[in-house]
Amino acid sequence: MQNARPNQLFRNMTAKIAAIPMILTALCVFVGGTVWTIVYSFTSSKLLPRAKFVGFDQYERLWSTSRWTVSLENLFIYGLCSLVLSLIIGFLLASLLDQKIRFENTFRSILLYPFALSFIVTGLVWQWILNPEFGVQSVVRGAGWIGFSFNPLYDSELVIYGVLIAGLWQGSGLIMVLMLAGMRGIDQDIWKASRVDGIPMWKTYILIIIPMMRPVFITTLVIIASGIVKVYDLVVAQTGGGPGISSEVPAKYVYDYMFQGQNLGQGFAASTMMLLAVLIVVIPWAYLEFGSKNRG
Amino acid sequence: MKAMLSALAVSTAIFAASPASAADLEVMHWWTSGGEAAAVGELAKAFDGTEHSWVDGAIAGGGGTARPIMVSRLIGGDPMGAFQFNHGRQAEELIEAGLLRDMTAIAEAEGWLDVVYPQSLLDSCTVDGKIYCAPVNIHSWQWLWLSNKAFESVGAAVPANWDEFVAAAPALRKAGLQPLAVGQQSWQTSGAFNVLMVALAGPDVLVKVYGDKDVDLAAGPELASVFAAAADAREMSQGSNVQDWNQATNLVITDKAGGQIMGDWAQGEFQVAGKVAGSDYTCLPGLGVNELIDTAGDAFYFPIVDDAEITAAQDVLAATLLSKETQVAFNLAKGSLPVRGDVDLSAANDCMKKGLEILAAGNTLPAVTQLNTEDTNNQLNDLFVEFFNDTGITPEAAQARFVDIIKSGE
């Protein structure tokens, strides 16, 4: 009776004490900062934050701005393409490397190498490669094909795909390595069994290996998705948002209005909308992912 | 050994001789193109001539990139010694927040009120009767820079005004030359539009639209004709695949483009390239239509710092910036006009002399940065960079969006 079950709160005390700084950081910096941003998005703050509330004015202005809608469209195109393509390219490269080829290490390093470069460097390199005056176009024309035209960065319809190429070049290597790690984690006996049964290799990959790699795919998806939402530096370095406003992205809108436009309220409203968009994607996913475990 | 010792002795003597109050003053600015760097070198030389020394804090990428960095240093409690802004409404809130020093005492001691011409430069530095900045130059936007050789090569006379330039554009295009060079930075396009407005609709229209936020005028026929002219400019600018303003100027310098609408800071680039005004290139103030210049420019602001040495050095810098010698050396290198009416600029070239004459005649107008907040300017930048790059936007549609921006502006 006197020694009832120890209070749950005091179990594992050392671990909990050790986690306190991180918990505080998370609460103050992430949650606190987020709440502060949302509150001030309802104010008319200009260069400095000022608590002069104006209701939904900033949001009304945001959604009537064509630059914001163009930014969202671009993010959607970039996001969808980069999600699908980097998964496909990463998986294909990984399964090719998985064939016990010679010089695997060398190939792996070469394919992963772009990931070691920052987005700024990537953006500049691809700005030069795609520049019509001295990039791909002039090389092909110099080789004799005069009518060749490939100028995505100065074409407002194509520019976001020019950015996409650079993004894929930079990011696919990492996806490949993650996938390869997942494939190496699969028991070799499964391969032997499928070979004994005479199942073709592509079928083994699609029907057995991919389902077994589910955790790897989820990690990869989270990494790709977070990269998509915050895409900023690549656009700044490669196109500066141009031509015109045709390669603008939401993160750049936030930065430009918060700092260059000296209109914090507008930048906060835009970043709150970005947060909302992320939540719309994350909450159903988290519900599916973690909700089912509680029931099971 | 002896030589080394004596050398050591000398160097310690030098250190000992310098007064205890000498300070290193970090000065932040965004002057990084060829002509600009030469000009800022003159300022540093003049300041190093005093007992203090200039620590250069240049930020590449123009005001749009540099201003946020400076503001975050100020707000973050790590103020620099002095920083460049375009005077006008950009620093309004920093002054209100009490981050900047009141320089009225220096201004009075140096007699700025008597020597600064035109007076409006000091007015833009003044809030509630106190002077917060030291203007260093006058920059005007209203210039059209033309390459003489480009026009000669197609057998046309160098245009004397905007309409002749528009008329000559097809010939340039046919010869494979770029009629009008415009970079991708968004402020270049809105700036060009504002110049067209001053030249074609007159300065009063600009002051009423931006200064009084006159919505009816913004929706009216005067502005409609300016938008039509902007559509011409858009047509002429198609195909100039450059980013920065000085790359666009370089197209004119190298005779690959007919002309560029750009402020007189472009002058410094021509100078660095060794081009001669009149024979190599031509400048038309007010696009040759309305010979007017605005009195935009650069000024230095001085943050409040908790260090008496730095404060003293700030005072010395403020006085140095406006001294006669610095004004002449700096402005000759930069291609801008001095803020003092009493200096001798006989070494100036043709274009600067044109500017000085217009200034002396009093044909000036306030700068857009003095009328609009940065927020409004940013919205205008977005509108015009889109307009200049997307031929699908009609001048009428652009004008409707322009009216909305003016309506919401403060």
Image (tube, coloured by chain):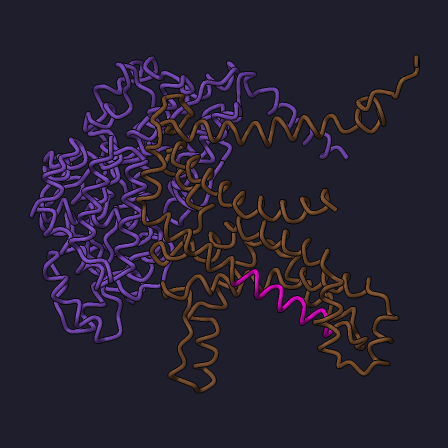
Chain colours: A brown, B purple
- Horizontal side, residue B188 vs residue A154: left or right: left
Q: Position of residue A139 (x, y in %)?
A: 48, 78
Residue B400: in magenta span: no
Q: Is residue B262 above or below residue A36?
A: below
> In the rendered view of the protein, which quadrant contains the C terminus of chain B?
top left
Q: How many marks?
A: 0
Judged by its main secondary structure, the magenta piece is helix
Q: Residue furthest right?
A: A2
* A89 in magenta: yes
Decide which of A268, A208 is in the foreground and name it.
A208
The residue nearer to you, when weighing A33 against A155, is A33
> Which residue is drawn at the image coordinates 17% and 72% (left, top)?
B171
Residue A13, how many percent across, how many down?
84, 24
Q: Which of the two residues, B271 or B94, is positioned nearer the viewer here?
A: B94
Which residue appears at 54% of the width and 48% of the height? A281
Quadrant position of residue B250: bottom left
Asked if B53 appears above or below B221 in the picture, the reply is: above
**Residue depicted at x 7% and y 48%:** B221
> Which residue sits furthest left?
B221
Query: Compared to B320, does A280 lie above or below?
Result: below
Q: Which residues are magenta?
A: A81-96
Residue B273 in the image: above or below residue A184: above
Which residue is more in the foreground, B135 or B217? B217
Residue A266 drawn at (x, y percent):
38, 36
Residue A99 in the figure: left or right of residue A79: right
Question: Residue A126 placed where, x, y %?
Answer: 51, 64
Query: Which quadrant, please, contains the N terminus of chain B?
Result: top right
Instruction: Tell me where residue B363 sits by quadrant.
Output: top left
